[in-house]
Image: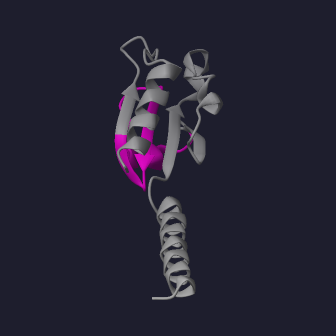
Amino acid sequence: MKDSEVTWEIFSVYMLVLIFMLFTGGAFGQITVKHFNAGWNEANGVDWLMDLKDCNTKGYIDIAKDTEAQKKYKIAVVPTIIIFKDGEEVARFQADLSFKLLATREEVQEEIDNQLMSDF
């Protein structure tokens, strides 16, 4: 084989690997975080939700106003934080009986990081 043919083969393989990485990086590992609470429990809200890293979507749902979401996600106590990966629930953090979320930002972030690392 000529040097130019070998160079072309290496370049082609390199480009295929890059394209594969580009497509799989966008198709897998999409993390969404939803925070469920109710207006009457604002004092126990999660004020650090927007500080979470490596999640594409962060959302707040007031279950007192959106009762369908309460049923759909089976919210029994507020606040509740649910982490979704590719649309499937992978972790849930719920308040205790005093309606206070005991999970910290660090614990929720650690779960997000674990979910992202599970792709590798």
Q: Nearer the viewer, residue 34 or 119?
A: 119
Residue sitting at 49 percent across and 53 percent down?
Answer: 30
* 64 or 49: nearer the viewer: 49
| Residue 73 visible here | yes
Point out residue 67 in the picture as x, y percentages from the top left corner: 47, 44
Please state the horizontal and vertical placement of residue 44, each as a whole percent of the image: 55, 16
What colour-coding does the image apply? one colour
Which residue is the extreme one toward the top? 98
- Would you say 17 lies left or right of 60 here? left
Q: Nearer the viewer, residue 66 or 110?
A: 110
Quadrant of res 62: top right
Q: Residue furthest front?
A: 2
Residue 40: x and y, percent?
57, 22
Magenta stretch encompasses residue 14:
no
Q: How many marks?
A: 0
Image position of 48 with respect to 83: above or below:
above
Vertical order, 62 against 110 (above or below): below
For the point 57% across and 23% down, the residue is 46
Which residues make up the magenta segment? 65-90
Question: Any magenta on residue 83?
Answer: yes
Q: Residue at x 36, y 37 (%)?
A: 91
Q: Is 93 left or right of 57, judged from the image as shown?
A: left
Quarter where residue 97 is shown = top left
Q: Residue at x 39, y 36 (%)?
A: 114
> Residue 39: percent from the left, percent from the top?
60, 27
Q: Quadrant of the N terminus?
A: bottom left
Q: Nearer the viewer, residue 114 or 107?
A: 114
Query: Does residue 63 show up?
Result: no
Identify whether 2 is placed above or below 34.
below
Q: Is residue 74 above or below residue 119?
A: above
